[in-house]
Amino acid sequence: MAITITMGIQKGGCGKSTTTGVLAYLLSKDGYRVLAIDMDSQGNLTELLSKKPANEFVEKSVLEAMQYRDPKKYIVQIDENLDLLPANNFLATFPRWIYTGITYTGDKIKYHGNPSLVLDETLEKVRNDYDFIVIDTPPSLSEQTTNALCASQYVVVLFECSNWCYSAIPNFMDSVDGARRHGRHNTRLLGILRTMNDVRRNDAKAFNEMIEEDYPNEVFKTIITRKAPIGRLSLYGFDQNNELEQALEQYKNFYKELMERVNSR
Ligand SMILES: Nc1ncnc2c1ncn2[C@@H]1O[C@H](COP(=O)(O)OP(=O)(O)OP(=O)(O)O)[C@@H](O)[C@H]1O
Ligand SMILES: [Mg+2]
């Protein structure tokens, strides 16, 4: 059965989508069968992996997969070992559908289950087809995020070294605890990854140290710094990208640490 990992933090712009895309790519190149799931209506992971506008996946996305409980129909093959369940702006109607039973196209599909377990129940049909499922989440503690957490064994928290990200962490950890109590996968923290680090800034250095003191066993040793080739992954993607090796350099150390943790649990 697939090991499922959610990337999250409700603060925006902390490297969630970038890290999810890179992790999915590295796992697939390592020979694992990977399903990447975009649970953010922004569709950034979708565009990063597919190199197509998220609007191309309207009515062909994770939202319909959940509404019709039919993930296979909506999974898109990206590469030999890499599949994607895409998202687009209509994923923002997910909560409205759960609570009213009316989809954004006006269809009636009443949902009677636990509002946080829709994704988990949907994935039952494909968990045996993959070694890893990695899930990107939006910058909010919304239904998309609680569904991703409840569908996962592991969570990686993205920490961009700033005050507002620091203050987001306790509530996010509460949501992980909630998923452990209400979900079916004993959802737990795999680690905290410091991202988009500006090594020259003293405040960033201070937050690096604070998070290490608060969560000494959870923070990954690897720190992802701000690098133009990582930022430009959103432009060039993983295919025919001349600076891909530079973009992946730091992430390979994170990948090694992450796999050690997965394999030791
Ligand atoms: N290490 C990095 N160096 C430079 N730019 C980066 C780095 N990591 C991510 N970026 C860029 O920073 C922006 C935010 O990253 P990303 O979209 O991955 O964050 P996010 O947490 O998914 O954001 P959101 O909360 O909006 O979903 C993007 O434009 C991305 O290309
Ligand atoms: Mg994102």
Image: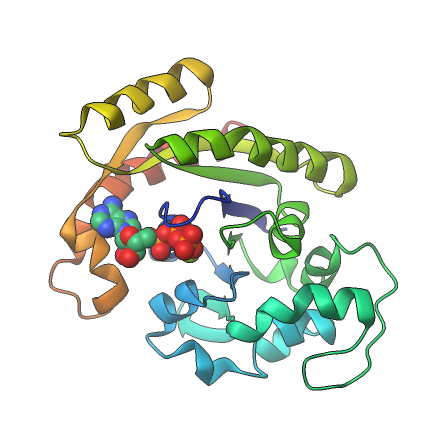
Is 136 left, or right, of 24 in this rendering?
A: right
Q: Nearer the viewer, residue 154 or 95?
A: 95
Where does residue 59 sit, x and y in percent of width and height? 59, 84
Left/right placement of residue 131 relative to residue 27 reads right
Residue that lies at the very extreme toward the right in this rendered image: 112
Q: Quadrant of residue 105?
A: bottom right
Q: Quadrant of the C terminus?
A: top right
**In this picture, is 169 found above or below 134?**
above
Which of these two is toward me, 33 or 153? 153
* Relative depth, front residue between 36 and 137: 137
159 sits to left or right of 226: right
Note whether residue 125 is visible.
no
Q: Residue at x 17, y 30 (%)?
A: 199
- Residue at 55% in and 32% down: 189
Which residue is painted at 88% across and 63% down in the image?
A: 112
Q: Residue at x 34, y 66 (%)?
A: 48
Q: Is residue 56 above or below residue 221?
A: below
Give the x, y percent position of residue 159: 39, 35
Q: Nearer the viewer, residue 161 or 78?
A: 161
- Residue 229: x, y in percent? 16, 54
- Is residue 154 positioned above or below 25 on the image? above
Which quarter of the frame holds ligand 2? bottom left
Based on the displayed image, in which of its 4 quarters is residue 171 positioned? top right
What coloring was used for the rendering? rainbow
